[in-house]
Amino acid sequence: MKRRSSLTLWTGAVFAGLVVLLALVSLFWLPYDSDDTSGGRLTGPGGGHLLGTDKLGRDLFTQLMTGSRIALQAGLGSVAVAALLGVTLGLLAAFAQGWFDDTLSALLDILIAFPTLLLAMLIVAARSATLGSAILAIGLAQSAVVARLTRILVKRVLAQDYITASRTSGTTWPRIVAGHVLPNMWPTLAVNLALQFGLAVLAEAGLSYLGLGAPPPNASWGRMLQEAQATFTTAPAGALAPGVLLVLLVIGVNLVADGLRDVLDPTARKDRAAA
Amino acid sequence: MTEPLLTVDGLTVRTGTGRELVSGLAFEIAPGERLGLIGESGSGKSLTTLAVLGLLPAGMTVTGSVRLDGTQIVGASEKTLVGVRGRSAAVVFQEPLTALDPLMRVGKQIAEPLRRRRDLKGTALKAAVVDLLEQVRLPEPDRIARAFPHEISGGQRQRVALAMALACDPALLVADEPTTALDVTVQAEMLDLIDGLVRDRGMAVLFVSHDLAVVAKVTDRVLVMKDGRAVESGAVTDVVRAPREAYTRALVDSARQLEAALDLDLGDAR
């Protein structure tokens, strides 16, 4: 079983790693300038262009590479926002009890009832369509899920005897949170955050597809999909390539999340303590 | 007469809806004295121990007075309580599975109160941890200190929990059914261990159990609780020999019956 879980983890890491590699390389080297339209419109794969060109004559592979950067930024940024806000709110709710907990829980339920994409669209529409507001919007929407999970996890840990024992030995609350509560909720939280990363990447692609993500000179996978849609029958590579990469990244991250679940389980860490 | 270590007077615990779970409970424990708190489940024993340490869950209201080592616990601020807990009283719980943090090595968990209460660091701290593990008679203390809780047995975990409570060097040890979840042979060893360690340190004990035989083994005095009230109290021998209340008599009788069943079986075997 241990073997299988590490296989999941590694497969996921390879899938997601490919995209990360693309993004890293794109920082130093691109096959063409992102505004180089010398390739001719909608050429097929080959002939100096690995995947061909889009309807404006830009190199598709170049766009894919810059797009991977945006996808990763969106995922990481949203998860950072969601984790920071969600964990803080969740901790507050779990410790506050009484009316604050009730009010916050009700608010979170309302937020969760809104589809992430719809909520993000509202926020982006109210601000401007930039990558920053997309990240903020997705992160905010996801923070509700993270907050609710954190609240439940914290409450579950707080009900354990070792917390009471720790309190009887005179440990202060901040120390209990740092020493016992956070480490014990971390495995579950980490898995959830990894899943949220995949969802955030998808959400950003969705927003870009609708024209609410990163604005035009940036090649977001979502917008590439949308632009290639009309010419799908004549130049399928333009739609397939960003779609495949999107699937690769999301599946990769989900597999990593799945593998993490087993790796972070303390009862599976026998090898470390037996010595 | 010296001042009692713990004085509980008119202790009443109510739920948020006003139902009384503990009513007008009063008892004292002198320094070094051992009191057994006995009663069936739901009689308010555990709530009483939590109230003594100011650990009742939010939403419960406490009235009356609990003076622990000169400090009023009822209505005290968290800051006062943090100061009193550990120094004056420490606790061992029933369930060895949840008594230890599953993600922290055993040694580190014992070190936590040691570092805070005795200000130990580095090798002195490590030595103190191993010393405590030896005192609770755990084999290979070095290995146990490096183990995670799931890697040691239930009985060993309970010994670790006891070591953690002793690490604070409290004046009062609160033991809430510390042997109930253990099997009978381990239970007897654990009781002997508590008995010896407490005697060496002149520690007072508040021992909670539903098992009269267990309480009789460790404590000098018992307080019998039923439905949140004290039904009877007195020296263990008096209560066992001549129970005054019907409920206590039922408790003693059922304990006797169990013992008699054991004698009968042995008789047949011969």
Image (cartoon, coloured by chain):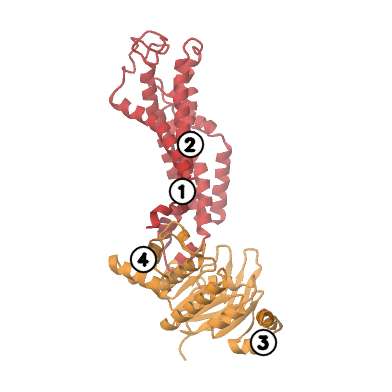
CB atoms of marks 2 and 1 within 8 Å:
no
Distance Cα–Cα, label 2 vs label 1: 15 Å
User: Of residues B184 and B75, which is closer to you in this image?
Assistant: B184
Please give the residue where the numbered disc 2 appears in the rendered image: A254
The answer to whether residue B103 is left or right of residue B264 is left
The residue positioned farthest toward the right in the image shown: B246
Is A206 placed above or below B127 here? above
Q: Do tags 4 and 3 sit on the same chain?
A: yes
- For mark 1, give the secondary structure: helix
* Viewer-nearest of discs 4 and 2: 4
As measured in the structure, the alpha-carbon distance from the residue carrying label 3 to the one carrying label 2 is: 66 Å
Residue A14 is situated, as x and y percent measured from the top left of the image, at 40, 33
Looking at the picture, which amino acid does disc 2 mark?
Answer: Asn
Q: Which mark is residue B75?
A: none
Q: Residue at x 64, y 89 (%)?
A: B241
- Of circles 1 and 4, the one toward us is 4
Mark 4 — residue?
A: B142
Tell me the shade of chain A: red
Name the chain letter of the residue that bears numbered label 2. Answer: A
Tell me residue B226's x, y (percent): 66, 76
Q: Which mark is residue A187?
A: 1
Asked if badges 2 and 1 are on one and the same chain, I answer yes
Residue A254 percent across, percent down from the top left: 48, 36
Q: Of callouts 4 and 3, which one flags the residue occurring earlier in the amino acid sequence?
A: 4
Kind of residue sitting beneath label 4: Asp
Check chain identity for marks 3 and 2: say if they share one.
no
Q: Which residue is mark 3?
A: B243
Q: Residue at x 54, y 66 (%)?
A: B95
Q: Are marks 3 and 1 on the same chain?
A: no
Q: Colour of chain B?
A: orange
